[in-house]
């Protein structure tokens, strides 16, 4: 695996190829990288953006309208990982990149207790939004989210932030969102240099994870 600390400033793709086996993926996240095809249906690239987008756990911006929306929904944890990643992979979404190989790889990480989902549901239980990501020690690396109703993905993010903020050693926890987009910026996401990200990542080592291993393991 490439070493992100040795990468040229501003470089994003540090390598191309390799497999999506659990050990490969976990080593990548631990070193500060994540996988994503370099183009739709293209080979897997190993990315380490500079700057990197993170959500400060004390910086989530929740508007009055979002709080109102949150009252309409119910959130659940790890109840339907396959449905969440499947909806995130909808090929009709702009810039969609999640293919069958990625789904298979992350479902295996879910089975092993490293991948997790937050689901947003209507009071009747219908799945209308959610997100998924990887948790290793004190790192939660957000991968993708989807929304079928207004604010449903944001409500899932609110639940995730609440879980992480309530956990012990919150000062050593890191919520990685890869890039700061205009949409995520409205929620409080910031950019930091890759070098600073790697420092924060190192501090997450040994922190007790928040999510539990799925009960059926």
Image: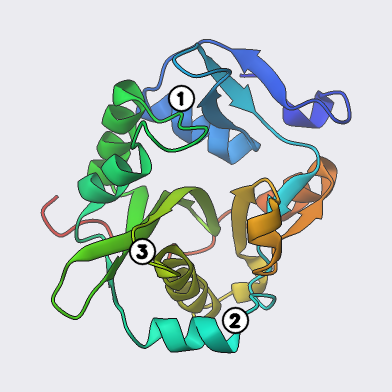
The image shows residue 98 at horizontal and vertical percentages of 40, 30
Looking at the rendered structure, the secondary structure element under dot 3 is loop
Looking at the rendered structure, the secondary structure element under dot 1 is helix
Write the residue at 21% across / 56% down. 214
Q: Are marks 1 and 3 in contact (CB under 8 Å)?
A: no
The image shows residue 109 at horizontal and vertical percentages of 32, 39
Within 10 Å of disc 1 (Cα), the crowding (few <14, some 14-19, many 20+) is few
Mark 2 — residue? Answer: 62
Figure coloring:
rainbow
Closer to viewer: mark 2 or mark 1: 2
* Label 2 or label 3, whichever comes before in sequence order: 2
Write the residue at 15% across / 72% down. 125
Task: Answer whether residue 144 is visible to the viewer in this image.
Answer: yes
Task: Answer whether residue 167 is visible to the viewer in this image.
Answer: no
* Rendered position, 142 above or below 51: below
Distance from Cα at disc 2 to Cα at disc 3: 23 Å
* Rendered position, 42 above or below 207: above
- Look at the image and tell me in which quarter the N terminus lies: top right
Spot the residue most to the right. 9
Mark 3 — residue? Answer: 211
Within 10 Å of disc 2 (Cα), the crowding (few <14, some 14-19, many 20+) is some
* Rendered position, 62 above or below 27: below
- Where is residue 4, by image quadrant? top right
What mark, if any, has residue 164 been given in the picture? none
The image shows residue 185 at horizontal and vertical percentages of 71, 61
What mark, if any, has residue 24 been given in the picture? 1
Within 10 Å of disc 3 (Cα), the crowding (few <14, some 14-19, many 20+) is some
Looking at the rendered structure, the secondary structure element under dot 2 is loop
* Label 2 or label 1, whichever comes before in sequence order: 1
Left or right position of 74 against 30: left
- Where is residue 119, by image quadrant? bottom left
């Amino acid at each position: 695996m490439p070493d992100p600390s040795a990468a040229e400033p501003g470089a994003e793709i540090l390598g191309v190829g390799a497999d999506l086996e659990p050990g490969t993926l976990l080593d990548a996240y631990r070193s500060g990288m994540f996988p994503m095809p370099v183009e739709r249906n293209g080979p897997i690239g190993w990315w380490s953006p500079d700057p990197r987008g993170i959500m400060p756990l004390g910086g989530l911006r929740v508007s009055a309208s979002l709080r109102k929306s949150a009252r309409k929904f119910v959130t659940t944890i790890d109840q339907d990982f396959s449905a969440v990643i499947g909806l995130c992979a909808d090929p009709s979404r702009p810039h969609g990149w999640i293919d069958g190989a990625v789904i298979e790889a992350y479902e295996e990480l879910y089975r092993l207790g490293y991948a997790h989902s937050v689901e947003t549901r209507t009071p009747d239980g219908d799945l209308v939004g959610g997100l998924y990501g990887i948790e290793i020690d004190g790192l939660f690396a957000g991968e993708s989210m989807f929304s079928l109703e207004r604010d449903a993905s944001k409500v899932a993010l609110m639940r995730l932030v609440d879980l992480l903020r309530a956990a012990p050693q919150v000062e050593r926890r890191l919520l990685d969102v890869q890039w700061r987009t205009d949409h995520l910026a409205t929620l409080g996401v910031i950019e930091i240099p890759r070098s600073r990200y790697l420092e924060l990542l190192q501090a997450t080592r040994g922190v007790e994870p928040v999510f539990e291993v799925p009960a059926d393991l």
